[in-house]
Image (cartoon, helix red, strand yellow):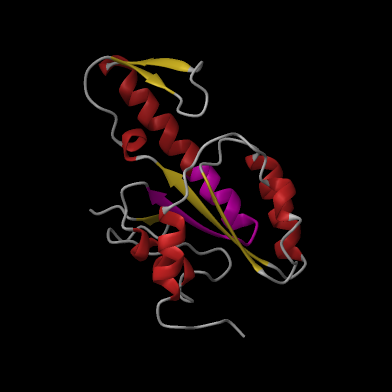
Amino acid sequence: APRTRSGTVSDLARALHDVQPGGTHPLAPMLERVPSRARAVIVSDFLGDAEQLLARSRERVASGGEVHAVHIVAREELEPVRGARLALDPENRSLRRPLSSATREAYAESFARWRAELAAGWRAAGAGYTMVVTDAPLDRVVRQVVSPRTTAPGQGAVAAGGDPSVAGVSS
């Protein structure tokens, strides 16, 4: 039976608040260390070994396990600043891309398409999927992800704007 206790959401939100993201370590092998019947919650930007992670998650769900993908997206990725600038990858400083008024629309369309494909892949695998924006209040995000009404296989958390795949984005 799931453990319930007043304050568990706050405890989890505090623990996540102290995490400093970074690096490009493969996550798929780590999924093997989680007991097969335990709920696995993957928190990632899915820029690393996403295909391998999805394949292992699909196997886990097929064998009766539960997986929920929490996709972390920076507000700056969704709403890049106006004007010309050089976008730097925070995990790989050698990766630099020019972003200008002329390229912004193509970037936004490509990024939106990739996020939609990512969400569809997780849902098709029978996993939950929630996109979380980095400036979202952690306690609210944790509640949305762990809520029974939002973690049914193939479902995502319902956010303020009514989009079932986005947490922490207001309309």
Residue 45 among magenta residues: no
**Residue 158 sits above or below residue 149 on the image:** above
User: What is the total number of numbered labels drawn onto the structure image?
Assistant: 0
- In magenta stretch: residue 119: yes
Residue 135 percent location from the top left of the image: 31, 48
Residue at horizontal 38 percent and vertical 20 percent from the top: 87
Give the side of residue 22 with respect to residue 142, left or right. Answer: right
Q: Is residue 125 above or below residue 116?
A: below
Residue 105 spot, x, y in % from top left: 32, 25
Bounds of the magenta span? Answer: 116-133
Based on the displayed image, in which of its 4 quarters is residue 124 positioned?
bottom right
**Viewer-nearest residue: 118 or 32:** 32
Q: Where is residue 1, by image quadrant?
A: bottom right
User: As rendered, which of 71 and 33 lies closer to the eye?
Assistant: 33
Q: Please state the horizontal and vertical placement of residue 137, each as a whole percent of the image.
A: 31, 58
As drawn, is 79 to the left or to the right of 74? left
Residue 13 higher or lower than 2, as above or below = above
What residue is at 56 percent from the left and 41 percent from the top? Answer: 46
